[in-house]
Image (cartoon, rainbow, N blue to C red):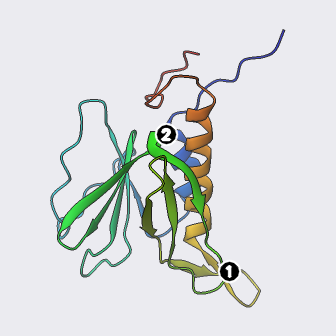
Amino acid sequence: MHSQRKRVSVASRAHRALKRIAAYRDLTTGGEWLTSSPPMPTMSNEETPIGLYINDPVASTDLVFFTTECIYVFRSGDWDQIRFAEIVRTSGPDQKVDVAGFDLLRKSESTFWLPIRGSHPKNGADGRYYDAFRVVRFVRNVVADIDRVPGRGSYATPGDTSP
């Protein structure tokens, strides 16, 4: 008999992977939408807001918004989105310095650029840790969880531990 894994909610995965990133604002733990930001995108009934990644706090360009179902990016004055269920794989970052984001490959074979430009200094060492690597890990884990559940087009909602 094989053991069945519990699904982890997207919110839980985001909290674990992204909470230490200074540019990330967790909306599930009392964080608020930035007053200087564009209005929140229109979401489906199945979506719950999770968090914001702020690339540029002054201009709100390339603002990244995570929900239980999608990733939204505010660019060129509008929200662009990709559903987690559409993502086949991540591509990049190709380098470990001056990382500005990475591509998400859709099932339709088109790509979606996810801008994640922040970084912070390494403790006691030269160089920097780039936020994109934490976000890549988060996205890969969410996509892997979806792929483990045959026929599942959406993700587990908070508190949902059904097989």
Residue 6 in the figure: left or right of residue 153: right
Q: Is residue 35 above or below residue 126?
A: above
Count of marks placed on residues: 2
At 62% from the left edge and 40% from the top edge, which residue is drawn? 144
Q: Please give the residue where the numbered disc 2 appears in the rendered image.
A: 10
Q: Residues within 10 Å of mark 2 (few under 14, many from 20)?
A: many
Question: Residue 96: which disc?
Answer: 1
71 or 39, which is in the foreground?
71
Quadrant of res 33: bottom left
Most distant residue in the bottom direction:
126
Q: Secondary structure at mark 2?
A: helix
Question: What quarter of the picture does the C terminus occupy?
Answer: top right
Q: Residues within 10 Å of mark 1 (few under 14, many from 20)?
A: few
Residue 98 in the figure: left or right of residue 86: right
Quadrant of res 91: bottom right
**Which residue type carries mark 1?**
Lys
Q: Which x, y percent locates residue 100?
A: 50, 79
Q: Is residue 95 above or below residue 45?
A: below
Depth check, mark 1 against mark 2: the one in front is 1
Earlier in the chain: of badge 1 and badge 2, it is 2
At 63% from the left edge and 55% from the top edge, which residue is drawn? 137
Residues marked 1 and 2 touching at CB (< 8 Å):
no
Distance in Å between CA atoms under marks 1 and 2? 26 Å
**Which residue type carries mark 2?**
Val
At 31% from the left edge and 36% from the top edge, which residue is drawn? 47
Q: Which x, y percent locates residue 105?
A: 51, 56
Question: What quarter of the picture does the N terminus occupy?
Answer: top right
Q: Which x, y percent locates residue 127?
A: 70, 88
Q: Is residue 161 above or below residue 137?
A: above
Q: Which x, y percent locates residue 126?
A: 74, 91
Residue 50 in the figure: left or right of residue 2: left
At 47% from the left edge and 71% from the top edge, which residue is drawn? 116
